[in-house]
Image: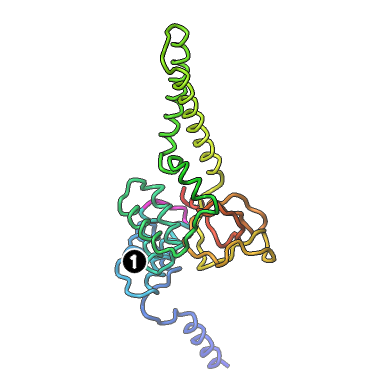
Amino acid sequence: MKLLLALALVLALVLALPVAGNGEPSVEETARLLDPHQLFTEANRLFNAARSQEELRRAVENYRALLARGIRNGRIYYNLGNAHLRLRELGPAILNLRRALRYLPQDPYAAATLDYARKQVPDEFPPQSGGRVLGALFFWHHQVSLSARLWTALMAHAFFWALLLARAFFRLPFHHTALGALLTVALAAFSSAAVETLSQRGEEGVIVVPQAQVRSGNGEGFDPVFSEPVHSGVEVRILESRGAWKLLEFPNGVRGWLRESAVESVAGEAL
C-alpha cells in the first residue's frame, strides 16, 4: 500500500510539471508575465524577426494583449496593422492603420502604408446611374475641401450684402448680375457643405472578414445588394445597428446590411 501511494505521488508530481515544448512560452504566458513595456518589446521582436505566419500571429496576439490591458497608442496600432498586412489580412490591416493615424495624423509612414493597403483591396464601387453626370456638373463638391466651400459661401454672402448696401448710395453698373452671381455662389457653397455634413452621419468602419454578402435588409432572407460578395478592407459608413446587423453605406452611396461581426468601427478601440 505504501509503495502504491509513493508511486501515485510521483505520478502526480510528474503530471504537474510543464510539458516540454520548443522552449518558448505561449502567448498567454508572455502576456501574463511581462509588464507592458516588456510585452511591447517582445511583440516588436517577434514582428521584426518573423519568418513565418505563426511568428507573425504571435506578434499580433501580443499587440492585442496590450490593447486588452487598455494600453493604446499609435505605435501599437501601426505595428499591428503592419503585421496584419504581412499576413494579407487587409481588413484588420486597414482598420488598425486608420486607428494609428488618429494618434499619428502627420506620420508619413502610417499614411503611406495605409495607401498601399487600400490599393490591395479588389472591390470597386462605380457611381450609380446618373452619378457620373452629377459628378461632372458638381465636380467642385468633391474636389474642393469642406472648409474652402464654407469660406466661399461666407465671403459670397458678405459681398452680396455689401453690394446691396452700396447700391443704396451709388449707381453701380451690372449690379443685378453681380448680386445674382454672388447669391448663386453662396447658396451653392452652403448647400454643398450641408449635404456633405449630413452625409457624414454615423461611424467610419472597415469590413474585416474575408468576404461577406451585403443584404437589402437585416436578415439572411433578404436579396443581395451586390452581385458578388464584398471583401476584407472595404471602407464604409456605419449608419444604424439593428439586432446582429448593421446598415452600411458604401463608397458609391449604395446602402446595405451586414452582420455586425463582419465590420468594425474605426473609432471602436482607437481612443
Residue assigned mark 1: 47
Horizontal relation, residue 220 to residue 101: left or right = right
Q: Vertically, is 82 above or below 103? A: below
Residue pictured at 58% horizontal, 93% vertical = 1
Residue pictured at 45% horizontal, 45% vertical = 136
Name the residue furthest right.
221
Q: Main secondary structure of the magenta part?
A: loop
Figure disc tally: 1
Q: Nearer the viewer, residue 40 or 203?
A: 203
Q: Vertically, is 225 above or below 202? A: below
* Type of the residue with mark 1: Phe
Q: What colour-coding does the image apply?
A: rainbow
Percent across and percent down for residue 138 are 47, 41
Q: Residues within 10 Å of mark 1 (few under 14, many from 20)?
A: many
- Res 93 → quadrant: bottom left
Horizontal relation, residue 111 to residue 8: left or right = left
Q: Nearer the viewer, residue 213 or 189?
A: 189
Name the residue furthest top.
169
Q: Nearer the viewer, residue 60 or 250?
A: 250
Q: Secondary structure at mark 1?
A: helix
Can residue 186 be found in the magenta stretch?
no
Q: Which residues are magenta?
A: 69-74
Q: Nearer the viewer, residue 178 or 146?
A: 178
Can residue 71 be found in the magenta stretch?
yes
Percent across and percent down for residue 133 are 50, 48
Residue pictured at 43% horizontal, 20% vertical = 159
Name the residue furthest front.
173
